[in-house]
Amino acid sequence: MKQVKIGIIGFGTVGAGVAAYLLENKTVIAKRIDMQLTLIGISDINIVTERDVNVPKELLTTDTNELIEKSDLIVELIGGITVAKDYILKALKQGKPIVTANKALLAEHGEELFAAAENSRANIYYEASVAGGIPIIKSLREGLAGNRIEKICGILNGTCNYILTKMEQDKTEFNTVLKKARELGYAEADPSFDIDGIDTAHKAVILASLAYGEWFRMKPIYIEGIRNISVIDIKFAEELEYKVKLLGIIKKSKDNVQIRVHPALIPSQKLMADIGGVNNGVFVKGIPVGEVLFCGRGAGMEATSSAVIADIIDVALNLKFSSHGRVPAFRTGKQFKNLIKMEDITTRYYIRVQVKDQLGVFSRISTILGEEKISISSLLQKEKHSTESVPIVIITHETQEKNISTAVKRIETLDVVIGKVNIIRIEDF
Amino acid sequence: MKQVKIGIIGFGTVGAGVAAYLLENKTVIAKRIDMQLTLIGISDINIVTERDVNVPKELLTTDTNELIEKSDLIVELIGGITVAKDYILKALKQGKPIVTANKALLAEHGEELFAAAENSRANIYYEASVAGGIPIIKSLREGLAGNRIEKICGILNGTCNYILTKMEQDKTEFNTVLKKARELGYAEADPSFDIDGIDTAHKAVILASLAYGEWFRMKPIYIEGIRNISVIDIKFAEELEYKVKLLGIIKKSKDNVQIRVHPALIPSQKLMADIGGVNNGVFVKGIPVGEVLFCGRGAGMEATSSAVIADIIDVALNLKFSSHGRVPAFRTGKQFKNLIKMEDITTRYYIRVQVKDQLGVFSRISTILGEEKISISSLLQKEKHSTESVPIVIITHETQEKNISTAVKRIETLDVVIGKVNIIRIEDF
């Protein structure tokens, strides 16, 4: 039985998990692929910290360079975009294929890395970089290979989805829920990466690049996190039969593509609206497949290990059959003309304005909307909750982002309007 | 650019659709795989009937044998288990790989066909045989390759799901909805294959075989269709916060496996309960991945074409890289001891008994349940709807199927009980 020597760089939770499951499922995997996957080492600068899973001590090493030399296949699980990149490039130069979960690195430096992979004829596999255990990369690249992708919409960050779900269930404000999420280990000590949408954007960039055959970078992507979502918005959304989710949205309109990350109102009766807690969901619309939805755990040691091991198996089979590059890790072949600017997107909007409870306020707002060619689809004006202000909630028909921006600026200057106007885009599916 | 010559056997709706999409997406596919997929012919005994999609007339032929000779890759889309099997075996003998959507054929003769494929070293690909456009075969075989599969639960038949969804929405009885489904083309003229669960069982057999490394046959599978579901059951289910779905259930308990097809009550708050209409859904629980759910259109020209074309691409890449059998079409390596008999399964049950409205009726029923070691979890007894009978609905705790069978038989002999007792198994997820 052919043997493949595997080296893991990074003895964190995921590294330890992958090691443990590789060892545990060794027989099953060997039966399935008629190959022996032999873990020969795990490297890290710190190999002393105890992990939750059992990994034989003799596998641990601090010498990453030596591990790369000795391995047939490198699993990069240190994360970050500096050291990880160096190790990957070094391994590729030696013609060694890579499996990585590093979405930040791919989103920021995908172009360079895949070019290096192309030169070395050793592939980079990255199933674990998006949506954890959900095999979305393989599905897009192979399972839906014959499709033209019209749209991808993803709940791609478990931390944000947990926070929004909790806010909705308990009607508790963002900061309180965030604190709880931190205590439970669902949010990092510095959670800005997740809650400001950066992590979702990294994943959206990877999905978009895969779907449309050209590496997008982070720069042209519109990114808005969930800090501005209040319980009052979630309540209004519920009343209007919507739920609030942080989405990565990739959409084709005619020959152009838009990529954006922001909270969105999703109709409650859609399956996507029911994906709660730390789960991820990816909705794909393609021709001819129609609509397909994938859901599952988007992070965590178990789900990530599943994706990493699937990639290891794929790479091992390529080594066995000398079929490197059989399915290119990333498919070039640009399938769009331009990236649509955020100001030019068209969608429906939820607008909440806090106003003084005076006569004629709504007519002043609706005049501005009319002048900016924004037409109102529905309206909620509640009796006042406080002496200070009352909320007016407006749902618009389809309109352009730039019209909304102008209207919002104008509305905010009205003397009857208190504070900022909150807008949330609507994603109708 | 390397070229692969494709021959399609079967000029039905799907055959015509695959041909049309292959031609339409030719450039996209060529860019993605750096290969030319050339459709050289479509054969059928009837090539005169007009199809909804446009296929060049010169591609049509009645000479299937000649088409097989000339093609590099055969797409079998005639269905049925006689002629289709002969053509597949003939093509395999010539070393030509097969793509098929024929679930009946695989479920009935999978063992023989995959043995022939093994001998010829030409693979059989069958993504389209289960759950239409959802890439579930690829996901199980590759995307979740490193997992031990604990459970698969599938809504695998669009016709049944449409009927049950309609019954639930409109509170209309089975026969009326079936008539409507026929008119809309969602049900065949002879719908027994779908509504009696045979089609779901074919798909369950394929999924189970893939998950547990041995070809199961149809014979040991318990199959129950949806003919006995009444609106009254759907209403009670709703009241108890469940929905009724026809499920293919594949489950591991200890080292043994159970495979069964029957209607089941699913808790309303689960995503699976929300998969409505003609859609399919497949829930997979694996270690380490946890729970993953896939949903999408389970049938129809478009979804099926998507799956068939993905398989064609996979096979074409194998031809290009001479990597036949890189991922074996079916993975041997039995991962269970025994198939659990239906009478030995353990689950919770919904039991509806129609009784005469007399004193002490419930105590007679509950005595029988107690004697058969069945414990009651909840109970619904409504005021009488008619002078003839009142329904009693019992939800049990976990119990063995054989205990329920005995209890039901005993309850049906009671003079206060009218007609048959209706039981529906509960799937808690």
Image: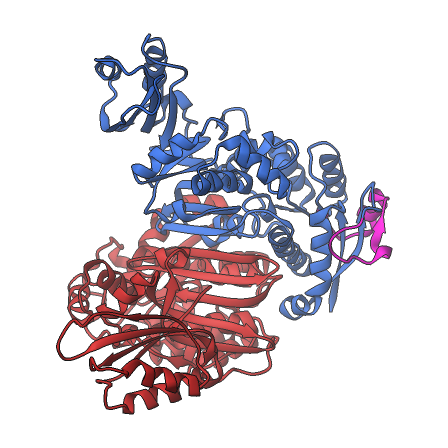
Chain colours: A red, B blue
What is the x, y in percent for residue A408? Answer: 34, 86
User: For the point 51% across and 59% down, which residue is it?
Assistant: A139
What is the x, y in percent for residue B284? Answer: 41, 46
Left or right of residue A80, residue B247 in this image? right
Which portion, as a residue range, is magenta?
A: B50-75
**Observer-nearest residue: A395 or B337?**
A395
Which of the 4 image quarters holds residue A198? Answer: bottom left
**Observer-nearest residue: A382 or B15?**
A382
User: In which quadrant of the rendered image does the N terminus of chain B lie?
Assistant: bottom right
**Observer-nearest residue: B319 or A392?**
A392
**A108 within the magenta span:** no
Q: Is residue B421 visible?
A: yes
Number of numbered labels in the structure image? 0
Left or right of residue A325, residue B420 in this image? left
Using the image, determine if residue B110 lies above or below residue B312.
Answer: above
**B53 within the magenta span:** yes
User: For the point 25% across and 21% down, which residue is it?
Assistant: B374
Name the residue at the front extreme: A359
**Observer-nearest residue: B278 or A334?**
B278
Using the image, determine if residue B44 lies above or below residue B302.
Answer: above
What is the x, y in percent for residue A118? Answer: 56, 75
User: In which quadrant of the rendered image does the C terminus of chain B lie?
Assistant: top left
What is the x, y in percent for residue B414? Answer: 32, 9
Q: Is residue A1 visible?
A: no
Which of the 4 image quarters holds residue A15? Answer: bottom left
